[in-house]
């Protein structure tokens, strides 16, 4: 896209969660740094200086001295009295010219978890977040979240006035039975206190006569419900199963505080819900394309579900007033937790990067083989989706929560295609681009069949025709859900 086309596109855009316009004709707008803070603390964004938002089309007012404004931005970005951290590189600030006027485009990246909160004028109360098209001051709970979530050991906090009476020993027995069936073993005759010391759940407080104290993660994992609520008053874990598309009424439920489950902690919730998710996972007859052997669909899908479930419990921010929610729906599973993952969506699916805010909880899951240090859970989920041609898993990352959606259905079955159209789409999911003759040869279609099918798929915007004539090619439409999935699969293969 050339400069003129780029600016024209901006002129027709409206402010939103990722885009802000500021006039800044004679100098840098005073509110620039509020937007910088809000973008940095939320999901990043673009600030365009020299444009005034208007209906139906924005106005270019231009900036009088773009180089001066660019220099001012970098000078103030490195001034702690203005903002506490500079996230900008030279390539993040561009000067563009259009119809004789200059505009300055500033790309503000999202700050990493250990850089947040980004605040102004040496006052942490001057922390901003982006809400729609507005910059809003963060409340005290959000600032607390940023401060705590910048660490990898939130759940390592040593708790005063807690002891073994706050621990549910039935959960310890349940955990030991799982642990001792794996490679690692612990002698259960040591006594519960010594077992928890060995597991890292009880740790020495070296500032207080080496007294053993319970960690916050240990309380969440093994604690009694009322004891957990004393430290985490909003502690809430929910599981729902729905057997209709409307989700008006659940058919099964597990929830902390219910009389049926009076003493739920993290591990007992994990065991109960994982069993339910496992039982309700339906099998599907599928053959390997090359070896013509039956594929273990149910087993693999269960593994993907477990990975997503454990990821949710490991990355949750337990001081939030929002519940962890697991949903088993007809077409998909949904895993929601307050607290953002510390990796990007791309890093999650690629694997190899392990970052968590709850190291105690993460270690306890790793010991029983439910999680791995290498951060490979997301890659396993992606691999399973690719293996069975399922709809691509969705990860929705916001600054303070995470949602992972795993689909049970394959891509092609959701498109309402004829058999011939289905065969072409299955081929294009692998090829991404092909000529008409290649499609005809591969699928043994006649000229007439190919023309009818391809015209239909182009009309439905599932395929795109690049040009007319012998050199014409068909491309999987990159605006469609299925095309996006195929593209992501191709990218992942490049990294492997």
Image (tube, rainbow, N blue to C red):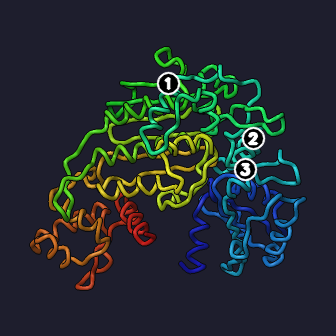
**In the rendered image of this protein, does residue 178 appear above or below residue 479?**
above
Q: Which residue is mark 3?
A: 135
Which residue is located at x 27 percent, y 68 percent? Answer: 428
Q: x, y (%) of residue 495?
A: 45, 70
Q: x, y (%) of residue 215?
A: 68, 35
Q: Which comes before the other along the chain, label 2 or label 3?
A: 3
Q: Are marks 1 and 2 in contact (CB under 8 Å)?
A: no
Residue 161 placement: quadrant: top right
Which residue is located at x 70 percent, y 37 percent? Answer: 203
Label 2 vs label 3, nearer the camera: 2
Q: x, y (%) of residue 340?
A: 60, 47
**Closest to the observer, 174 or 338:** 174
Direction top: furthest residue: 259
- Find numbered disc 2 in the image and state the secondary structure of the residue it sits on: helix
**Closest to the observer, 367 or 56:** 367
Q: x, y (%) of residue 438?
A: 20, 78
**Closest to the observer, 50 or 188:** 188
Direction bottom: furthest residue: 470
Q: Which numbered tag is attached to residue 255? A: 1
* Residue 16 appears left or right of 213: left
* Residue 223 appears left or right of 181: right
Which residue is located at x 23 percent, y 51 percent? Answer: 416
* Residue 94 appears left or right of 428: right
- Find numbered disc 1 in the image and state the secondary structure of the residue it sits on: strand
* Residue 219 appears left or right of 159: left
């Amino acid at each position: 896209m050339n400069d003129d086309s780029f600016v024209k596109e901006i002129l027709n855009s409206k402010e939103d969660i990722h885009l802000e316009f500021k006039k800044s004709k004679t100098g840098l707008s005073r509110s620039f740094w509020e937007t910088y803070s809000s973008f940095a603390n939320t999901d990043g964004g673009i600030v365009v200086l020299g444009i005034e938002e208007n209906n139906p089309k924005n106005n270019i007012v231009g900036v009088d001295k773009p180089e001066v404004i660019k220099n001012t931005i970098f000078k103030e970005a490195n001034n702690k009295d203005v903002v506490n951290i500079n996230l900008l590189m030279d390539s993040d600030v561009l000067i563009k010219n259009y119809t004789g006027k200059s505009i300055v485009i500033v790309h503000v990246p999202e700050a990493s978890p250990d850089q947040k909160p980004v605040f102004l004028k040496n006052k942490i109360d001057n922390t901003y977040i982006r809400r729609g098209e507005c910059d809003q001051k963060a409340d005290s709970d959000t600032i607390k979240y940023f401060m705590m979530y910048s660490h990898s050991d939130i759940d390592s906090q040593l708790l005063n006035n807690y002891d073994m009476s706050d621990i549910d020993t039935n959960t310890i027995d349940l955990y030991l039975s799982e642990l001792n069936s794996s490679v690692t073993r612990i002698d259960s005759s040591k006594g519960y206190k010594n077992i928890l010391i060995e597991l890292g759940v009880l740790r020495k407080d070296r500032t207080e006569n080496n007294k053993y104290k319970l960690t916050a993660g240990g309380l969440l994992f093994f604690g009694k419900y009322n004891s957990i609520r004393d430290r985490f008053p909003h502690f809430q874990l929910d599981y729902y199963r729905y057997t209709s598309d409307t989700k008006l009424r659940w058919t099964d439920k597990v929830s902390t505080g219910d009389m049926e489950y009076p003493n739920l902690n993290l591990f007992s919730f994990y065991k109960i819900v994982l069993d339910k998710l496992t039982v309700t996972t339906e099998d599907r007859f599928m053959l390997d394309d090359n070896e013509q052997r039956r594929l273990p669909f149910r087993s693999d899908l269960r593994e993907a579900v477990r990975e997503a479930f454990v990821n949710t419990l490991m990355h949750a921010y337990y001081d939030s007033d929002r519940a962890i929610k697991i949903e088993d729906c007809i077409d998909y599973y949904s895993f929601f937790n307050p607290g953002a993952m510390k990796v990007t969506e791309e890093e999650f699916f690629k694997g190899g990067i392990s970052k968590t805010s709850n190291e105690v909880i993460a270690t306890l899951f790793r010991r029983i083989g439910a999680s791995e240090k290498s951060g490979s859970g997301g890659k396993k989920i992606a691999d399973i989706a690719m293996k069975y041609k399922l709809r691509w898993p969705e990860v929705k990352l916001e600054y303070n929560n995470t949602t992972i959606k795993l689909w049970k259905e394959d891509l092609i079955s959701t498109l309402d295609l004829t058999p011939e159209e289905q065969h072409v789409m299955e081929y294009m999911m692998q090829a991404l681009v092909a000529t008409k003759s290649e499609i005809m040869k591969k699928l043994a279609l006649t000229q007439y069949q190919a023309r009818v099918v391809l015209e239909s798929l182009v009309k439905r915007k599932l395929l795109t025709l690049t040009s007319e004539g012998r050199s014409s090619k068909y491309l999987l439409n990159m605006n469609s859900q299925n095309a996006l999935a195929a593209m992501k699969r191709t990218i992942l293969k490049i990294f492997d």
